[in-house]
Image: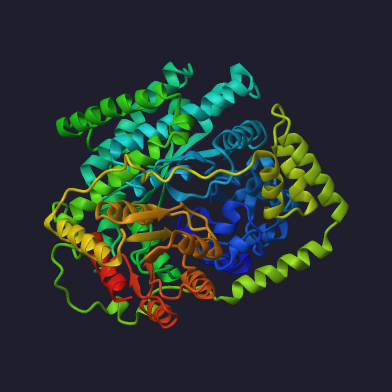
Amino acid sequence: MRTYAGHSTPAESNALYRRNLAKGQTGLSVAFDLPTQTGYDPDAALAAGEVGKVGVPIAHLGDMEALFDGIPLASMNTSMTINATAMWLLALYQVAAERQGADLAALAGTTQNDIVKEYLSRGTYVFPPGPSLRLTTDLIAYAVTALPKWNPINICSYHLQEAGADPVQEIAYALSTAITVLDAVRDSGQVPEDEFDLVVERISFFVNAGVRFVEELCKMRAFTRLWDEITRDRYGVTDAAKRRFRYGVQVNSLGLTEAQPENNVARIVLEMLAVTLSKDARARAVQLPAWNEALGLPRPWDQQWSLRMQQVLAYESDLLEYGDLFAGSYAVETKTTELAIAARAEMERVRAMGGVVAAVESGYLKSQLVAKHAERRARIESGEQPVVGVNAFKETEPNPLIADLDAAIQTVDPEVEHHAVAALGAWRKTRDAEAVDAALTHLRTDAATPSANLMPATLECARAGVTTGEWAGALREVFGEFRAPTGIGADAPTADASSGLRALREYVHEISRERGRRLRILVGKPGLDGHSNGAEQIAVRARDAGFEVVYQGIRLTPAQIAAAAVAEDVHCVGLSVLSGSHLRLVPDVIDRLREAGAADIPVVVGGIIPDADAKALKERGVAEVFTPKDYDMTESLTRIVDLIRAA
């Protein structure tokens, strides 16, 4: 039982972990901030406004030791949601454990280490797919022998569903990723053939559970069935225990609503049941989101509520006293078989393209997810897919839980970033510069040597006091960087022409005629926030409405966005910020537009933005703020055209 947690500083996160463990939590799930996830130090330009916002900042070994101060790592099970920099964070964790005197053979936990879905959903990739797969492979090959209780990879279908995947796509793309990873480890020659079953045994999965209870339950049974087939037939694993589909789950966040957020409790419980009721496909670990995540950063009390939901199910109910409740069910078996057949077909399609890496590089996977997400959005907007409190049953009594909305969420002190930068400077002054240089030279040399496993050089860097940004920077020099396909090209889906969309198209055409050229909107993702689903959906809908759309993807500085707005001569700048850094990044974009003589371009912002922050942004010059309650994109774009007309 875990809650996904971490924020502000290592010390504050450590205190939170200790409180959660005292309340009966049985493991830790670490959330890292975006600079840590993308290989930047707190003083990097792109880290501005992002430090400590969506997780804890870990810049070096000292931070890792502070994070787990007083928590014996030899007896802890720790899950780390980390991907592009997974090798680095595991090295820091191992060295911190060594300094506690821990037996490495006793270290238990998981590094997510699934880079494929980062190109498709979360956006915290750094390097091109090939070098990234090498980092994944090297970590697995190292951990299987050096850290025998550690799960070196946690293949994530969770984020695929958050990006729009239906159950068939979730199964197919996750299992295709697993095949690519296992093939790479096998072909690297780093693990003896007669020990390869140990690699298969350590593969774990992290899945999503949506609100369609029966379908989600059957999805897990299909996952279990297909994984058993793959590990037996493709990899020759004869021990049934080593073929077991081992998975943890966080239930769906995509479906959590800002409107009537109290309804999210019912959604969370129903989704938890989908992955616990069927014993033959039951999750080994469950972590639940908080009811108010669509409003902002949950407080410790909100996380406690999510933990108590699990404890009531596990300790008060009789669920664990019975075998599989659905064995022999015709409806469940039929749906499970249907999902398995469709997933096999989609896996074959990916295989025919050259595997999952080729399907990422070609843009196929991203375009499929964008299309599926667009279909979901269209169903909600039309009312075909009811969402209680959003497009159905909207009448409500005042909610006492959010009577004081600013107190209903947690905020991160802006001074956290200044403290982290100062602490980083102090760390650099106290370390052995020669040892740091030697360790980084070793890392670069090994990175340029394809046959070298990068974990030993990474451990040397950790022990020498190298920082996160320095480690990733050395690898950037050798591997280069990568910008993933956006999925909104000409082959992206076109929305059905509802009466609202037809009216918007006419409105766009009218104002375009008035302005003497087609309306042009820039959709921008400032900072390190890689959750681009909303930006992509707005870009696609704007294109369908007749706008010319400028969208350059994720991870742009305010200066780059302002420069692009001026160069492209846009009529509006739309910024999407989901990391909580809106108060820092958005005003920076506005200031740079003013400096460039483009203060007349209206700037709108979308994201999880509390009312007080929305007011502050408008005082700084933002024309309009959109939050999850503004689910009708056609209506939102109509308001944007109004702003352009009035500008």
Identity of the residue drawn at 42% across and 68% down: 298
Q: Percent from the top left, x then y, of residue 116? A: 48, 39
Q: Quadrant of residue 414?
A: bottom right
Q: 169 or 185, which is in the foreground?
A: 169
Q: Is residue 459 above or below residue 532?
A: above
Q: Percent from the top left, x then y, of residue 149? A: 59, 38
Looking at the image, residue 506 sits to the left or right of residue 537; the answer is left
Q: Quadrant of residue 629?
A: bottom left
Q: Percent from the top left, x then y, of residue 356? A: 45, 30
Say which quadrant the C terminus sits in: bottom left
Q: 544 or 169, which is in the foreground?
A: 544
Can see residue 314? yes
Looking at the image, residue 388 sits to the left or right of residue 250; the answer is left
Can see residue 103? no
Identity of the residue drawn at 32% across and 69% down: 626
Q: Quadrant of residue 513?
A: bottom left
Q: 393 or 640, which is in the foreground?
A: 640
Looking at the image, residue 155 sits to the left or right of residue 319; the answer is right
Q: 172 or 64, which is in the foreground?
A: 172
Looking at the image, residue 558 sits to the left or right of residue 391; the answer is right
Furthest residue toward front: 516
Q: Percent from the top left, x then y, of residue 421? A: 68, 68
